[in-house]
């Protein structure tokens, strides 16, 4: 017998969607930040409340039943409405509260962190939450209020402002920079399962020169420290490499093209005064910093 008095709740659908997307209790638990036993308990309760079996329990995971599949689209529609309501509510506030900003870790650490200092001084009620990630936060699901993104962007639901461009160069200590092309050792930024244009460009260059890649890493700070230690040549953003005078830029006839940088917000969330203030401030400060790097 179902003991629920209030019927179906949004939180039930949140657990339902997480499990349908993850396909396992452990995966859904990680997405939701709970124990896997909590997921199992909530799904069982939801099935009892609806009088439907929503998932087949299989040895290799949980698969939505036919009834469960029919509910997914409706549950996602509810999810979108809840997110839209949350964004709308965020717009009715003063210049105080948390503002979540996501960006690639290097941009976050070396451009954005310093840029928010004067803002926090002038508006102590605003609390920036800085999230470093190489993945694109889903602004449609409110994973961030503001995002700084490299590369082309096309999404009709987003407000996109061009901040400038991030230039790249090849950097090394003098002993590495002066080597003939065939004797060069390169340090490559690579992430498993993700194709970055910078990595592809460097692989093609190495192949043309007959050089070699001596180190691969998914951490840009590791690459620059390896380059500073004399291990090889790294392709680095100029705003970052400029902080290390011991590194020389290696001349290159066909350099990697500068990547456009955009400040992105959802059309709804930009109405929040605190978000708009932070966005305008970051736009000005980051644009100024990039302009100073030749």
Image: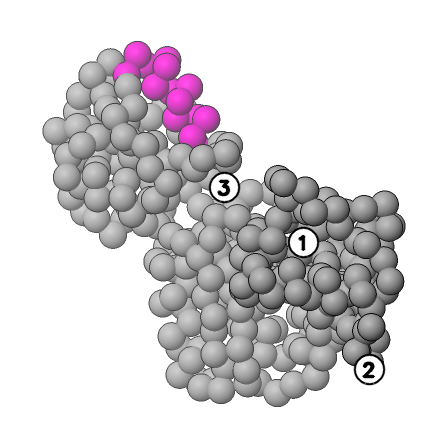
The disc, 1 or 2, on the residue closer to the chain's N-terminal end is 2
Quadrant hosting residue 174: top left
User: Does residue 45 appear left or right of residue 35 in this picture?
Assistant: right
User: Does residue 210 appear left or right of residue 266 in this picture?
Assistant: left
Any magenta on residue 292? no
Q: What is the CA distance from the residue labelled 3 to the residue labelled 1?
A: 37 Å
Label drawn at residue 265: none
The disc, 3 or 1, on the residue closer to the chain's N-terminal end is 1
Q: What is the CA distance from the residue labelled 2 to the residue labelled 3?
A: 55 Å
Is residue 252 at least partly visible in the picture?
Answer: yes
Mark 3 or mark 1: which is in front? 1
Crowding around mark 1 (Cα neighbors within 10 Å: few <14, some 14 to 19, many 20+) is: many
Q: Residue furthest front?
A: 1
Tell me which segment is drawn in magenta: 198-211
Q: Position of residue 211 (x, y in %)?
A: 28, 16
Helix, strand or loop at mark 1? helix
In the picture of the structure, the residue carrying the numbered disc 3 is 259
Give me the residue at 57% from left, 85% from top: 95
On screen, residue 261 above or below 253? below
| Disc 1 and disc 2 in contact, CB within 8 angstroms | no
User: Does residue 246 appear left or right of residue 282 in this picture?
Assistant: left
The disc, 2 or 3, on the residue closer to the chain's N-terminal end is 2
In the picture of the structure, the residue carrying the numbered disc 1 is 19
On screen, residue 242 above or below 201? below
261, 109: nearer the viewer: 109
258, 192: nearer the viewer: 192
Is residue 159 at least partly visible in the picture?
Answer: no
User: Does residue 207 appear left or right of residue 257 in this picture?
Assistant: left
| Quarter that holds the N terminus | bottom right
The colour style of the image is one colour
Label drawn at residue 5: 2
Any magenta on residue 199? yes
């Amino acid at each position: 017998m179902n003991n629920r008095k209030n019927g179906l709740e949004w939180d039930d659908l949140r657990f339902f969607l997480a499990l349908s997307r993850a396909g396992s209790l452990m995966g859904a638990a990680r997405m939701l930040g709970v124990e896997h036993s909590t997921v199992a308990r909530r799904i069982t309760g939801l099935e009892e409340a609806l009088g439907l079996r929503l998932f087949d329990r299989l040895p290799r995971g949980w698969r939505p039943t036919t009834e469960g599949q029919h509910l997914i689209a409706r549950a996602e529609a509810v999810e979108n409405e809840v997110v839209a309501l949350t964004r709308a509510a965020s717009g009715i506030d003063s210049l105080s509260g948390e503002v979540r900003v996501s960006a690639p870790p290097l941009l976050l650490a070396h451009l954005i962190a310093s840029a928010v200092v004067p803002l926090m001084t002038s508006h102590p009620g605003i609390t920036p939450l800085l999230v470093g990630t190489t993945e694109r936060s889903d602004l449609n699901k409110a994973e961030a209020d503001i995002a700084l993104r490299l590369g082309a962007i096309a999404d009709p639901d987003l407000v996109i402002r061009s901040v400038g461009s991030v230039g790249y160069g090849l950097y090394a200590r003098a002993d590495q920079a002066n080597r003939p092309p065939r004797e060069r050792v390169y340090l490559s930024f690579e992430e498993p399962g993700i194709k970055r244009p910078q990595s592809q460009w460097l692989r093609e260059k190495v192949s043309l020169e007959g050089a070699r890649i001596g180190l691969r890493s998914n951490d840009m700070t590791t690459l620059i420290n390896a380059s500073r230690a004399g291990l090889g040549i790294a392709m680095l953003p100029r705003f970052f490499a400029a902080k290390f005078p011991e590194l020389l830029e290696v001349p290159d006839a066909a350099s990697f093209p500068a990547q456009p940088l955009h400040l992105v917000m959802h059309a709804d969330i930009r109405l929040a005064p605190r978000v708009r203030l932070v966005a305008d401030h970051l736009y000005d400060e980051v644009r100024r910093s990039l302009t100073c790097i030749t």
